[in-house]
Image (cartoon, helix red, strand yellow):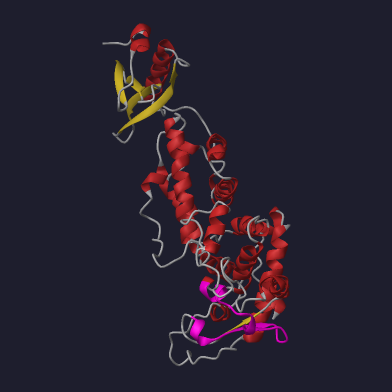
Amino acid sequence: MKLTTTKIKGIKPKSKTYRISDGNGLCLEVTPAGKKLWRFRYKKYDGKYTMLSIGRYPEVSLSEAREAVLEKRKALAHGRPANTKKEAFEAVFREWYEKNKSQWTENHAKTTYRRIEKNILPWLGNFQINDITPRSLLECLRRIEKRGAVETAHRVLQICNQIFVYAVASGISEDNPAAKIKGALSPVSKNEFPAVTELSEVKILWENINNYNGSFITQCGLKLLMLTLLRPGELRKGKWEEIDLRNRCWNIPAERMKKRKPHVVPLSKQALNILEELHPLTDRSEYIFPSTSTNQRPMSNNTLNMALRRMGYSKEELVAHGLRKTASTLLHEQGWPSEIIEKQLAHIDRNQIRGIYNKAKYLQERKIMLQHWADYLDELLSADEAFIKKAPRDIFQKLY
C-alpha cells in the first residue's frame, strides 16, 4: 500500500531501523531515534542492488521523493547513473570533516585532516567521488606503505572508509571503495609500537611536546626520547653519573640495556641544554628522572605515556616507545645510512661476523646525525608548507 502524508506522520520508531515501501523502489527508513529517511533501492549495471539516499522527511516531502525517484529511473533507463549529484572527493571530505571535528580533540582533528590532505587529496582530491575505484584508492595507500609507514596507511584507510560511509548515507556516493580493500594492505606487526611517522604529524607532535603544560620534568623526558632515540626504560632509569659533559655523551652501562651491551649516546646541543635545565631540579636524586613520590626510585613507566594521553593521543596512535620509530622513519627518509641509525637505536647486527660489538662504533657519524636531527626538529616548529613538502635526501652527503 502506498504511503500518504497522514500515514507518514503517524509512523513510530521501533527498537531497530525498519523500512516501509511506497513502491517503484522508494521506501521510508525509520531509525530508532525517530528519523525518517527516503531511500531508493535499484539494480546497478553489475546486477547488484544498492540503496541511494534521497533526503530526510519532512525536508523532502512525499511528492518530492516520488518525483526524485522518477528522475532516477529515467536516468537508469537511458544508461546513466542514478546518482547524478556530482561531488569532488575533496569537497565531500571537507563536508564530513566539518560535521565531525567538534566531537574530536584538537590534536585528533589536526591529525585526521593532515593525513587526508597529504596522502589522498594530491591524487584523488579532484576526482568525482563516484569515479574513485578500490584500485585508485589502494594506489594512494601503497605510496604510504612504501615509506615504511604501514600503520599510517591503515589509519588513512580507516578515515577514507568513514568518509565514504558518510557519502553513501548522504546520497552523494553509490559505493564505498574503501570497504573493499581492507585486506589488501600489509599487516601491522604486532611487535611494532604505535608511532607518528608522517612529517606533518611529527610537526604537530613536536609542537604538542614543546607546549605541554604538565610536569616540566616529564616534558624534558619526552624531548630527550625524541633527541636520543633511547628506549623509555633506558631514559627513565638514567643516572646523573652516566652523563659525560666534557665529551658530550651519555654512557649507559650494559646492565641497563636491552641487549646487555654498553651504549654510548652522543648528546646534541639541545639535549645538553635540557639536561642543564633539569640538573637543579633533580640533582638530589641519583636519577635524572626521579619518581614524583620519592628520589630513591626512577620515574614510573606510565608517566610518559600518560603525558601523551593528556595531549590527545590514544594508545593505538602513539606510545612513548614509538618515538624511536618516529625518529628512525624520518632519518631513513632523509637518506641517513641504515647502519648508523640502527647503531643509535642499539640494535645488534644479527650477522655474527659483523656483529662484533663496539659501543663507540660510528660515534662521529652518530654525533653529526643527532645534531642534525635536533636542528631539524627546531626548524620543524616554524616550518611552512614548502618545508613540509620538501624531501631532503641529500642531508647526509652535505654534513658528512
The answer to whether 258 appears left or right of 335 in the picture is: left
Is residue 208 among the parts visible in the rendering?
A: yes
Please name whichever residue, 90 or 369, is drawn nearer the observer in this view of the structure.
Answer: 369
Reply above or below: 11 against 221.
Answer: above
Q: How many marks?
A: 0
Q: Where is residue 126 drawn, in percent x and y?
A: 57, 41
Reply above or below: 282 against 311.
Answer: below
* Magenta segment boundaries in residue numbering: 233-257
Q: Which residue is drawn at 58% across and 65% down?
A: 292
The answer to whether 47 appears left or right of 371 in the picture is: left
Q: Which residue is drawn at 67% across and 59% down?
A: 210
Residue 315: say if magenta: no
Q: Where is residue 148 drawn, in percent x and y?
A: 50, 65
In the rendered image, which quarter is residue 165 located in? top left
Residue 253: say if magenta: yes
Q: Residue at x 33, y 25 (%)?
A: 41
Please name whichever residue, 379 or 249, is drawn nearer the observer in this view of the structure.
Answer: 249
Q: Where is residue 103 drawn, in percent x and y?
A: 53, 39
